[in-house]
């Protein structure tokens, strides 16, 4: 039974502390759409998405209105396209991207994820063709998001795929140069990609998932920051307990929305992703949570320790609040989407090297980082390889979403708009990785992957 104080507390979280449901994402399997005729495949994909998701946006809006809980995004994820495209030509894969975009637009969803490939151990010819299409697909569509899983703890790191993703990023930046190279914001490179992630750009509907599923991503950095501020100068043990209790309350709201959406749509409930996902809005920043703990600025010594404690406490509190927790679940540190991160980069307190260290203890990786447009392709590949290695060695998901902004240099600013925010262009190493990346092949899996 909810008491009056709990209801008022939740209302205050929504009204004053930016608490929201960041996304309700419907996952849809496309395996039964497979056809050796490209046009027929696209028709079947379009028909199935329209049939399965026709009530997603209206239902989410009904829940939002009925419960007074903001639901910011309504999204779709589909089976990785490389798995259903088979022998299609590059033009065929491009038609699939356009089909996904058309369906998403007509349904009114924000994004559709799943123009993706799983190539951690090697690339099929179909996956290779699909990956070559990604830059054009992201430049001619509005809502399609793409991801490539280049590594896993079990398989090691496919360095040939890493090299190809560096090329994809640079070409995507060039093709969308007139829009601040925004196409790169819709592309992410993974290690250990989760199959039930509701967040973009990395969402896809994994092969172990049901026919259709509802996954929900919650948010609430402002709520956590406010709770820490009210607590004052308490000990770390008291602080961890406070964060756990706050994460529990945030996740319970996500569980409620997930169960309601599942019931009304007649679709199984998958998971709640309890990540703290920031926005550029004032008071909705993970960086500001860390600063409320006592750091003068995020990036100062102690930042990684503070983030580690935050991430752990969020997981502990959130796990108690939901029947099924999954996806990424933790704390996101995207630069352009977090007001505090933007401030720290702009004043020189936060470097890409410090961000990389922080990714060892947060829930994703190097996210929404603007780098100079003239950054060498091999340097982009080296950044990816370093981040992916952290995920492989630590048996965790890591990801890279960097944006080499054409015609921008260090100190310039680029605006992406909306939740994607804006970012100062951050410096990267001027030393070359070209000969290292050119070796190709596969970095073997770590010894601790042999657990059978």
Image: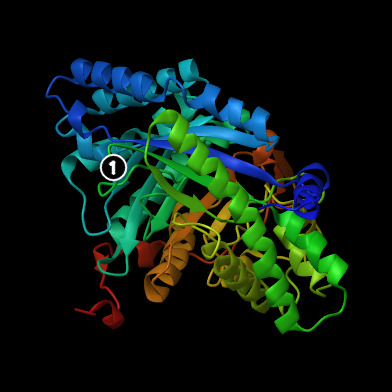
Specify whether 431 is left or right of 420: left
Residue 29 located left or right of residue 397:
left
On the question of residue 112 being in view, the answer is no
Q: How many marks?
A: 1
Note whether residue 377 is visible. Answer: yes
Q: Quadrant of residue 50?
A: top left
Q: In screen coordinates, is 228 left or right of 190?
A: right
Residue placed at 21% from the left, 34% from the top? 31
Where 100 falls versus 82 (above or below)? above
From what the image shows, is residue 162 above or below residue 70?
below
Based on the displayed image, in which of its 4 quarters is residue 250 positioned? Answer: bottom right
Say what secondary structure mark 1 lies in.
loop
Q: Nearer the viewer, residue 179 or 335?
A: 335
Image quadrant holding the C terminus, namely bottom left
| 144 versus 98 height, above or below | below
The residue to which callout 1 is attached is 210
Crowding at dot 1, Cα within 10 Å, few <14 / some 14-19 / many 20+, comes out as: some
Q: Is residue 234 left or right of residue 110?
A: right
Colour style of the rendered protein structure: rainbow
Residue 30, position as x, y percentages in the image: 26, 32
Kindly indicate the quadrant of the structure image that contains residue 343.
bottom right
Residue at 34 percent across and 49 percent down: it is 164
Estimate the x, y position of residue 292 in percent, counting from the top left.
Answer: 82, 68
Q: Residue furthest left?
A: 36
The residue lying furthest to the front in this view is 1
Q: Nearer the viewer, residue 348 or 306?
A: 306
User: Where is residue 449 drawn, in percent x and y?
Assistant: 27, 77
Q: What residue is at 45 percent from the left and 23 percent from the top?
A: 104
Residue 409: image location, x then y, percent: 68, 48
């Amino acid at each position: 039974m909810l008491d009056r104080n709990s209801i008022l507390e939740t209302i205050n979280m929504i009204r004053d502390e930016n608490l929201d449901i960041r996304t309700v994402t419907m996952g849809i399997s496309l395996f039964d759409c497979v056809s050796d005729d490209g046009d027929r495949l696209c028709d079947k994909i379009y028909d199935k998405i329209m049939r399965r998701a026709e009530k997603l946006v209206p239902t989410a809006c009904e829940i939002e209105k009925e419960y007074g809980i903001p639901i910011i995004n309504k999204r779709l994820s589909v089976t990785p396209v490389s798995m259903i495209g088979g022998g299609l030509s590059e033009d065929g894969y491009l038609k699939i991207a356009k089909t996904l975009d058309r369906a998403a637009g007509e349904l009114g969803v924000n994004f559709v994820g799943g123009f993706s490939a799983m190539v951690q151990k090697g690339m099929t010819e179909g996956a290779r063709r699909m990956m070559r299409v990604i830059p054009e697909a992201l430049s001619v569509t509005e809502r399609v998001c793409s991801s490539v899983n280049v590594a896993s703890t079990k398989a090691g790191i496919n360095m040939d795929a890493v090299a190809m993703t560096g090329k994809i990023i640079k070409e995507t930046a060039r093709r969308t140069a007139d829009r601040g190279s925004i196409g790169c914001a819709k592309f992410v490179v993974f290690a250990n990609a989760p199959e039930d992630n509701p967040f973009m750009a990395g969402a896809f509907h994994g092969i172990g998932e049901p026919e259709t599923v509802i996954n929900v991503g919650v948010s609430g950095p402002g709520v956590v920051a406010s709770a820490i501020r009210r607590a004052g100068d308490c000990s770390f043990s008291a602080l961890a307990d406070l964060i756990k209790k706050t994460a529990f309350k945030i996740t319970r709201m996500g569980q409620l929305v997930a169960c309601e959406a599942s019931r009304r749509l007649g679709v199984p409930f998958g998971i709640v992703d309890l990540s703290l996902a920031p926005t550029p809005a004032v008071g909705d920043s993970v960086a500001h949570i860390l600063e409320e703990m006592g750091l003068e600025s995020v990036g100062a010594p102690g930042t990684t320790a503070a983030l580690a404690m935050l991430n752990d406490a969020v997981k502990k509190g959130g796990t108690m609040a939901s029947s099924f927790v999954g996806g990424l679940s933790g704390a996101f540190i995207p630069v352009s989407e977090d007001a505090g991160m933007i401030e720290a980069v702009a004043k020189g307190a936060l470097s890409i090297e410090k961000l990389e260290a922080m990714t060892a203890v947060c829930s994703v990786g190097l996210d929404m980082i603007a780098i100079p447009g003239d950054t060498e392709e091999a340097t982009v590949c080296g950044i990816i390889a370093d981040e992916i290695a952290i995920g492989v060695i630590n048996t965790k998901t890591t990801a890279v979403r960097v944006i080499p902004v054409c015609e921008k240099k260090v100190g310039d600013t680029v605006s992406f708009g909306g939740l994607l925010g804006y970012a100062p262009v951050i410096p990267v190493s001027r030393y070359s990785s070209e000969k290292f990346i050119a070796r190709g092949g596969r970095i073997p899996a770590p010894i601790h992957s042999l657990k059978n």
